[in-house]
Image (cartoon, coloured by chain):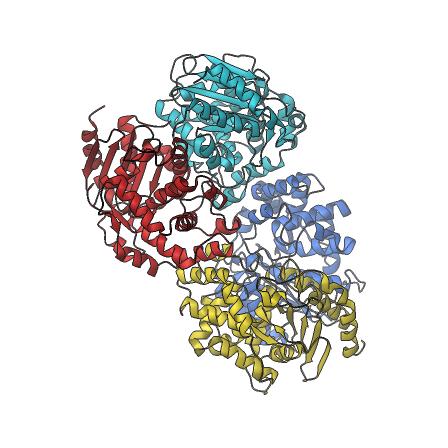
Chain colours: A red, B cyan, C yellow, D blue
Amino acid sequence: MKDLQGILHEIADLVAPLCRQGEVASYIPSLGEVSPDNFGMCVAMADGSIYGAGDWRTPFSIQSISKVFSLALVMSYDYESIWKRVFREPSGTPFNSMIQLEADRGIPRNPFINAGALVVTDRLLTLTGDAAGSVRGLLRSESGNASIDIDAVVAASEADHGHRNASMAHLLASYGNLENPVDLVLENYFKQCAMEMNCEDLAKASLFLARQGVSAGGSPFLSPNQSKRVNAVMLTCGTYDAAGEFAYRVGLPGKSGVGGGIVAIIPGRCSITVWGPALGPNGNSVAGIAALDAFTSRTGWSIF
Amino acid sequence: MKDLQGILHEIADLVAPLCRQGEVASYIPSLGEVSPDNFGMCVAMADGSIYGAGDWRTPFSIQSISKVFSLALVMSYDYESIWKRVFREPSGTPFNSMIQLEADRGIPRNPFINAGALVVTDRLLTLTGDAAGSVRGLLRSESGNASIDIDAVVAASEADHGHRNASMAHLLASYGNLENPVDLVLENYFKQCAMEMNCEDLAKASLFLARQGVSAGGSPFLSPNQSKRVNAVMLTCGTYDAAGEFAYRVGLPGKSGVGGGIVAIIPGRCSITVWGPALGPNGNSVAGIAALDAFTSRTGWSIF
Amino acid sequence: MKDLQGILHEIADLVAPLCRQGEVASYIPSLGEVSPDNFGMCVAMADGSIYGAGDWRTPFSIQSISKVFSLALVMSYDYESIWKRVFREPSGTPFNSMIQLEADRGIPRNPFINAGALVVTDRLLTLTGDAAGSVRGLLRSESGNASIDIDAVVAASEADHGHRNASMAHLLASYGNLENPVDLVLENYFKQCAMEMNCEDLAKASLFLARQGVSAGGSPFLSPNQSKRVNAVMLTCGTYDAAGEFAYRVGLPGKSGVGGGIVAIIPGRCSITVWGPALGPNGNSVAGIAALDAFTSRTGWSIF
Amino acid sequence: MKDLQGILHEIADLVAPLCRQGEVASYIPSLGEVSPDNFGMCVAMADGSIYGAGDWRTPFSIQSISKVFSLALVMSYDYESIWKRVFREPSGTPFNSMIQLEADRGIPRNPFINAGALVVTDRLLTLTGDAAGSVRGLLRSESGNASIDIDAVVAASEADHGHRNASMAHLLASYGNLENPVDLVLENYFKQCAMEMNCEDLAKASLFLARQGVSAGGSPFLSPNQSKRVNAVMLTCGTYDAAGEFAYRVGLPGKSGVGGGIVAIIPGRCSITVWGPALGPNGNSVAGIAALDAFTSRTGWSIF
């Protein structure tokens, strides 16, 4: 195997031509303005060493990747009780579908589709009084970067274009599956998704999932069993209705966001972040998935 | 860690009280006659050593576990072309649902639901002229047991009660997604599912998936990449619409059958088979899943 | 045929034992408090003569029956353009389902399911500036009863328990199918449904549909063609997903509400109202449907 | 009103330009070979007088229109028991959908979608021993044309291209909703659909539905109540998932077939047949619906 740094540079060159395939998310203006030519990648090894390539220090909107951190926080406080309010099965349908939510009487299929993430945010709000603030606190402490913050323009813009999420939150409420007022849950959800980070900070912040739950400070944030289970949910549900495809091609637990970022975990070894704003039909970064595919092929690292 | 043999005996004792939870499949008489008190477990290590407990040498009907072998065979001949005719996404719905098949215009969600397995069997029939015979040949050569065979009573009984599979096969044919006559595909499919094996033979026969595709004879049956990909599909799709639950609790690639068997793989380490005839609401062995859960907890072996 | 008044008295006796079959709607307290023992029936003949029995002068909440009047108003202003925003097909699913709304990209199946009625109310709001007020105005002028009004307690209660309608309105808005703010549309919708009327006033107010659109004052409110078409939509879509059953048993255009009222029309002859608060599984009055069934059997009046 | 014969000639001229809109059904060769330029129309008055225009004496394949006659026959023998095996609700989905059939556990939505018609044919087979022969017998006796027969080429062709209907029949059988062998039910169904008739014979054969069930010979074939109910089912379910649209535009009970024919009934007055082979997106004759629309507009005849 070549040195890791060399592999990352090769991959950045390799996927550059793919950056214009797919479409940058444009449902809110601030996301739509990001250039599709950005590409960044970072690997944080379990021992703390860091490798990066391309635009790996350019901040972007982490969007749905935040759902991993809110789930981890809820599990750290409250372990298993969240699973009474959300399933952990792949959805088999597009990421914002309300069809299953109705068929399943208000219990979302998993915590990584929007409906499920709203339930997790609601629970975190009950547990901490400030869901978005708790997520920000975790991201700051794990990455060691105290300047990580919510992009207020993005958060406000999400709220302005948030009819679909509002619809979902009201539907959850109609089934009695929200503990807090709809508007407060939505506000926290939009803020949490609007967190701005770069590949480096995101790889560091996710590293606890590659270290059996041990935090950057060395103390257990999650138990080994909890960490393993968050990874299992990422593998089966982390990339919307392309989870099977992602497992087949990349073969790692991963979570994507419409900002074009993806986090993947190799348990015991490293966390990996990629960022490429243009998305394929399932809402995952085209360049990002290709980069992860190339990375596992070249390193031979896999969980299978 | 205790010695492996001791762990298996402990688990057999542990799950014995669960054997009467759930229901033995009874849609055909020969399955319904099996006693729910049976429980067997076997671990085949990559180095060839074997550990067993309980009724691990009592034969049972492997049913849908056969789908792993027919998929592996098709991939060994023909690598990727099968994926034009079947997706590899979790179904999110019960294992025999025709709803998605129609919504997806005749392309089954994955090769492990019945519709997808019919397509794989059809392809194997085209490639070999005898799909059930090919599966049997693979099972015999990998297990080293030349007496493994189709239970003709079960196969005939499946055909007699096979209106639902016949319905699915005709629907596939109506979308042009079968190459061979409906009756011939069904006959091969029923035979392949009616293969009778015990835990030991099944663990041995599955071991190539824990050895990067290397067969019992030491030659490559699948490439490392193909083997990894079969495992990925097992993880996301191997236990019907409980794949997320199985990943969460057990954390391993696995494939279950309505005969009560389950095969699980720890890549690089071992294959594991369990057998307990009583099934939970999703069609997976209740005692079997509990045994696998206990096994990963006690050994600490996991892919996450 | 017996005299009409006698038939109504007979029917009131006949259906009395049915009043305790089914369940009074209880999703808001003010509806749940109504006694199921109420039963009223009124026939308004095209020539203006009126026949009534039972509690035909006791006011009740007309709920979804209001949808007939909002649709008629929109058609009177604007004839056909509403059909770009709502289909006129039976839904085939329960009356508050969001599944079809999503599958059909925000175009409700018909104007008598909640989603479709929200679109009609939205359109009426644009056309008149006060949708609920317009409906009230029509009800007053056609019935000749200027005291008909919105029950403010019911309207407020609907809003308090309105997460599901709010969810639907936001979903419509996410597809661009609302012209006015979500909250304003909901307020008008809840008020319009909270109109309180008795069988007599409701029969008089509906009579224009039995007189080819001619209003109580003798002037054309709808054209004959429009009147015929409102009746056609009532027949195919007026009783939620029991429209086929209603057509089979009663054989008349009809519209029901969860307050237990039903309006039916015999074009050219009369309008009929029944009221019995206990609802069957499809949300239609059990006693009411039985009464209409008996009425058409005894009079022989039918459109088929 | 002009004289009826004149109206029919006018309509034939009016819809001629529409004959090339839409597509002739081509799933079997013999249907695909019919020229779209054909157009025929016939009105049979309750008093026995007949009016025709265009190709009203050219035979065509009646296809799904046969479902009206098989339903009427079953009801004539056995009145209500068929409704335990088939619902009478509009389907809300395309005419050959299996989705609802599975969701409803093998009970078809209504007798006029394919699945429901298979159940009716199965029942008729049990009652008479020869379902297709019984339908033919009824068509011959009511039309007075003893040469009406099955087009054997069409029937064979349907069987050759019948995977979808075979799929549906096996699905019905898997739910225990067929009394006879799948192949026998399919054979009778294909034959019944392959009946060849012209507009005149078809209008005469349907006339009992406009005469409260009284047959051509003057004896009661159906009771007035049964006749009324067949008409009700035609209105809500007779034109696949365009039943609401048909009721809105035409306002009559009607049943269409993919051969391009439509039968409509004005109870108490007449039966009307139209034929134009080119179909719109919902599988109904484009010229035929336009002709019926024009007919009700010009005569003012309507049930609403």
State whether residue A288 appears in this view. Answer: yes
On screen, residue C87 versus residue C22, left or right, reads left
Residue at (49% x, 41% y) in the render: B92
Percent position of residue A297, x then y: 29, 28
| Residue for point 39% across, 57% down | A184
Q: Taking D99 as reference, is D174 above or below it?
A: above
Is B205 drawn above or below residue D71 in the view shown?
above
| Closest to the observer, A126 or B63 | A126
Please provide percent x and percent y for residue D174. Answer: 64, 39
The front one of C24 and A82 is: A82
Q: How many labels does the image show?
A: 0
Q: Is residue A274 left or right of residue C247?
A: left
Front position in the image: A51 or B26: A51
Q: Residue at x 43, y 47 (%)?
A: A116
- Placement of the C terminus of chain D among the 4 image quadrants: bottom right
Residue B76 at x, y = what percent?
A: 41, 23
Q: Which residue is drawn at 36% across and 56% down?
A: A187
> Eyeballing the image, is A96 above or below B224?
below
Residue D21 visible in the shown view: no
